Image (cartoon, helix red, strand yellow):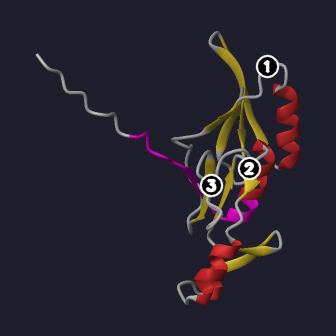
Amino acid sequence: MSETHEAAPAPLHFKLVIDCADPQAQADFWAAALHYTAEDNGAFIERLLAAGALPGEATVEFHGRLAFRDLVAVRHPQDPFDADSGTGLGRRLLFQRVPEAKTAKNRLHLDVHAGPERRDAEVERLTALGASVLREVKEPSGQWVVMADPEGNEFCVQ
């Protein structure tokens, strides 16, 4: 009996998109929090503007370069990225401007893994960046600190 083996589909690439009021401020916070890099889409945006594919009011200056007004991403500095567009091809968070404010608990959140020996120092560092401590959790399954970023999005430091 002959078996046919189909090749497994390639894993899908994804990014985590976070709705927010101020994408640039959120990108700055999370880039500092995770030691990530804000993506530089400036050359891509300049090409879109020159081609008439993007209106000037859809852009802002961010860290001395052109950026999208309503979107900005941060990426792991060691992950690959598309040099043509500046878009990360690995671990990344995309902050997207939305008109409504956050109204309820997150259904999805980040866990930042600092380790028990660094947790307190990371909580202090993140608080200095603009995060706030919501509560400390000590359970038989583990210990972590629930925090909120500057716009109130919950995340945990483990």
Q: Are marks 3 and 2 in contact (CB under 8 Å)?
A: no
The first of marks 3 and 1 along the sequence is: 3
Q: Nearer the viewer, residue 120 or 55?
A: 55
User: Which residue is denoted by mark 2 in the rendering?
Assistant: 30
Amino acid tagged 3: Gly
Q: Are marks 1 and 2 in contact (CB under 8 Å)?
A: no
- State the image quarter where residue 117 is shown: top right
Distance, label 3 to label 1, CA atoms, is 30 Å
Indicate left or right for 15 with 2 as reference: right
Q: Which label sits on residue 88?
A: 3
Amino acid tagged 2: Trp
> Is residue 156 in view?
yes
Residue in view at x 72 percent, y 78 percent: 60
Look at the picture and state if 136 lies above or below 63: above
Q: Nearer the viewer, residue 116 or 133?
A: 116
Residue range highlighted in magenta: 10-26
Which dot, 3 or 1, sits closer to the camera? Answer: 3
Distance, label 1 to label 2, CA atoms, is 21 Å
Residue 15 among magenta residues: yes
- State the image quarter where residue 54 is shown: bottom right
Q: Secondary structure at mark 3?
A: loop
Amino acid tagged 1: Pro
Look at the picture and state if 123 lies above or below 21: above
